[in-house]
């Protein structure tokens, strides 16, 4: 390498005696200069002991970067650089508050929501330390966003206030001109130990806050409290007042609330709330809850929702007689889905979903679906009920109080009466009240009643699936001449393949009725739908049903098969058709 190639030029820029940037340009890139910069944030610090760099600026290696570019990367504020004790033996409150204050006053680049300054993804790094604090880590100013606090343990000291929170996203100086206090603040990979003094995290009037992979314990009030704002997402976290893996004799008497949501548009996913007390408490003064709770585990802790509006609870597991309670304040429950959950109890007769109407009954009930849940050792409550009753007489009374959540609130009801033998009695629904159904027939008959009650209107498919074979034949006779072939296809598909007891009120699987299918064959063939007619015939042949078709239909089928050179099909069909 020549002298020019080995030459090195050193530039030093000094500004205000408080910020020094050193950049090296050189032809020898093996020196890897400029890969990391540790910049003294405040050379006139107030602490007596000199400290290492408070702020680390990371930037990739570049030979062509200008000196000013060293200040552009996101900043990482290390607590140990502020004198915090990572062993948890001494109080680190002041050091943590100073680091938070510096982060909030850091460089910004534009706005998020109106009035929310973008901090560019700054990080307050705990570096896996264990920090003891005696006062809440409350943000000093409002109007900041795009900030991360991560990676360590924070514990309350013995003189921590009983009504405070370890991390408090509410400004000590209120700015009434802002619609929201903070936006896009992420708290992740944290263990918060409240030491039975106060709570874990408080979020006040903020937007798009993420709480991810946190373990919050030993709280005496709330593990997480959200007041106002929108879109707080809590996921992959564990919350419990006590640390136990079950079997604690005092679990049922534990207090505290794991997650208290007093705002709307929130989501709680993949969260475990163990060890007693209340699991989730949802209450929104505005009356618009709009919260999703999915794939959570509630151990001896349930869910309470006041006046739920657009609430979705699904795919969660409730252990130890934990249940869901809908609490009436203004008597409103609207747009609620409680589906696909599992409940496990101790055979004490506890309902999996309950109503609290001490402050007044629910009077505005609409679009509530509580269905497809399963229980073990608890009572199953729902808004959709299915039941069958057998008897010999002219009157059948079906009581659904043990199954239905709401009293005396039928929206849709459908029943099928299956008479034994060859009788076909007239029957009618005579009375519906107090979650009881009375059905009467004109003559005494031995029969079975299959009944389904909906809190929502049934679909056409559900109604068709509830028809008996005799009713189906009558329906076919009415719709085939009108060329309603899509409906005929639906009936055929349901009666021949999808007729399972779990999905409908008709017992058995395949309809064993030759006349029923013969009506279909005539209808398809007379409407030039040969292949569908053959499908019906194949079902009949597979079930050894007698295939009776008219001569004109027989000729039509044979001609169609021969026209398509399907001679073998025609010969096989000739052997079974009578």
Image: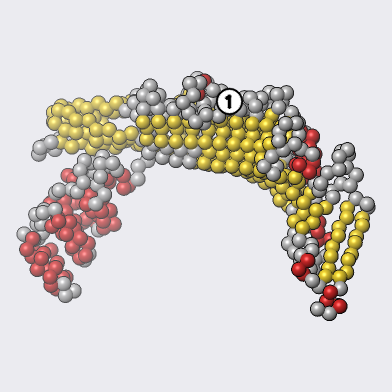
Residue annotated with mark 1: 256
User: Horizontal and vertical percent for residue 227?
Assistant: 65, 33
Tell me which corner region of the image, top left, top right, bottom left or bottom right, holds residue 168: top right
Identified at 35% across, 42% down, the residue is 458
Quadrant (top left/top right/bottom left/bottom right) for the C terminus: bottom left
Residue 406 drawn at (x, y percent): 41, 28
Query: Considering depth in this image, is 316 or 363 the residue closer to the camera?
Result: 316
- The furthest residue to the right: 16
Q: Is residue 124 visible?
A: yes
Closer to the camera in the image, 13 or 351? 13
Could you tell me which secondary element the residue under label 1 belongs to? Answer: loop
Packing grade of label 1 (10 A; few <14, some 14-19, many >=20) is many
Q: Residue at coordinates 6% horizontally, 63% vertically from top-left?
A: 575
In the image as oriented, which residue stretches furthest toward the bottom? 2
Question: Relative to 138, is 12 above or below?
Answer: below
Q: Which x, y percent locates residue 537?
A: 16, 59
Name the quadrant of the N terminus: bottom right
Q: Is residue 413 left or right of residue 60?
A: left
Residue at 89%, 47% (x, y): give it. Answer: 43
User: In the figure, 416 relative to 6: above or below?
Assistant: above
């Amino acid at each position: 390498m020549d002298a020019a190639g080995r030459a090195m030029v050193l530039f030093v820029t000094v500004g205000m005696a408080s910020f020094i940037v050193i950049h090296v340009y050189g032809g020898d890139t093996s020196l890897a200069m400029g890969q990391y910069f540790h910049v003294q944030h405040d050379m006139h610090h107030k602490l007596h002991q000199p400290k290492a760099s408070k702020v680390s600026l990371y930037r990739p290696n570049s030979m062509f970067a200008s000196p000013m570019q060293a200040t552009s990367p996101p900043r990482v504020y290390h607590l140990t650089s502020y004198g915090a004790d990572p062993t948890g033996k001494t109080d680190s409150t002041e050091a943590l508050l100073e680091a938070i204050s510096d982060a909030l006053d850091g460089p910004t680049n534009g706005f998020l929501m109106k009035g929310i300054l973008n901090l560019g993804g700054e990080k307050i790094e705990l570096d896996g330390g264990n920090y003891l604090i005696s006062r809440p880590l409350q943000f000093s100013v409002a109007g900041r966003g795009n900030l991360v606090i991560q990676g360590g343990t924070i514990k309350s000291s013995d003189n921590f206030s009983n009504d405070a929170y370890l991390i408090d996203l509410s400004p000590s100086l209120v700015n009434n001109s802002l619609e929201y206090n903070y936006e896009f603040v992420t708290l992740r990979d944290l263990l918060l130990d409240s030491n039975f003094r106060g709570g874990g995290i408080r979020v006040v009037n903020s937007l798009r806050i993420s709480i991810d992979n946190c373990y919050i314990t030993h709280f005496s009030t709330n593990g997480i409290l959200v007041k106002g704002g929108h879109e707080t997402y809590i996921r992959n976290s564990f919350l419990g007042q006590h640390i136990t893996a079950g079997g604690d004799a005092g679990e049922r008497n534990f207090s505290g609330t794991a997650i208290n949501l007093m705002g709307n548009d929130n989501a709680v996913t993949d969260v475990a709330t163990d060890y007693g007390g209340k699991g989730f408490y949802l209450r929104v003064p505005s009356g618009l809850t709009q919260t999703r709770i999915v794939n959570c585990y509630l151990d001896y802790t349930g869910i309470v929702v006041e006046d739920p509006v657009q609430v979705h609870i699904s795919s969660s597991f409730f252990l130890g007689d934990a249940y869901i309670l809908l609490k009436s304040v203004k008597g409103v429950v609207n747009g609620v889905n409680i589906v696909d959950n599992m409940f496990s109890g101790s055979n004490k007769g506890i309902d999996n979903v309950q109503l609290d109407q001490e402050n007044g009954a629910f009077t505005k009930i609409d679009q509530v679906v509580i269905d497809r849940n399963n229980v073990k050792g608890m009572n199953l409550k729902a808004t959709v009920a299915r039941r069958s009753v057998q008897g010999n007489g002219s009157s059948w009374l079906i009581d659904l109080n043990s199954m239905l959540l709401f009293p005396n609130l039928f929206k849709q009801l459908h029943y099928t009466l299956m008479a034994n033998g060859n009788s076909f009695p007239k029957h009618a629904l005579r009375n519906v009240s107090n979650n009881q159904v009375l059905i009467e027939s004109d003559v005494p008959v031995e029969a079975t009643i299959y009944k389904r009650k909906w809190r929502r209107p049934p679909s056409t498919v559900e109604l068709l699936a509830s028809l008996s074979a005799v009713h189906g034949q009558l329906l076919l006779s009415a719709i085939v001449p009108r060329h309603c072939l899509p409906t005929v296809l639906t009936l055929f598909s349901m009666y021949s393949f999808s007729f399972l007891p779990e999905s409908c009120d008709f017992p058995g699987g395949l309809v064993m009725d030759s006349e029923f299918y013969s009506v279909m064959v005539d209808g398809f063939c007379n409407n030039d739908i040969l292949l569908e007619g053959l499908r019906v015939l194949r079902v009949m042949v597979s079930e050894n049903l007698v295939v009776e078709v008219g001569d004109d239909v027989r000729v039509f089928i044979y001609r169609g098969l021969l026209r398509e050179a399907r001679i073998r099909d025609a010969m096989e069909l000739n052997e079974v058709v009578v």
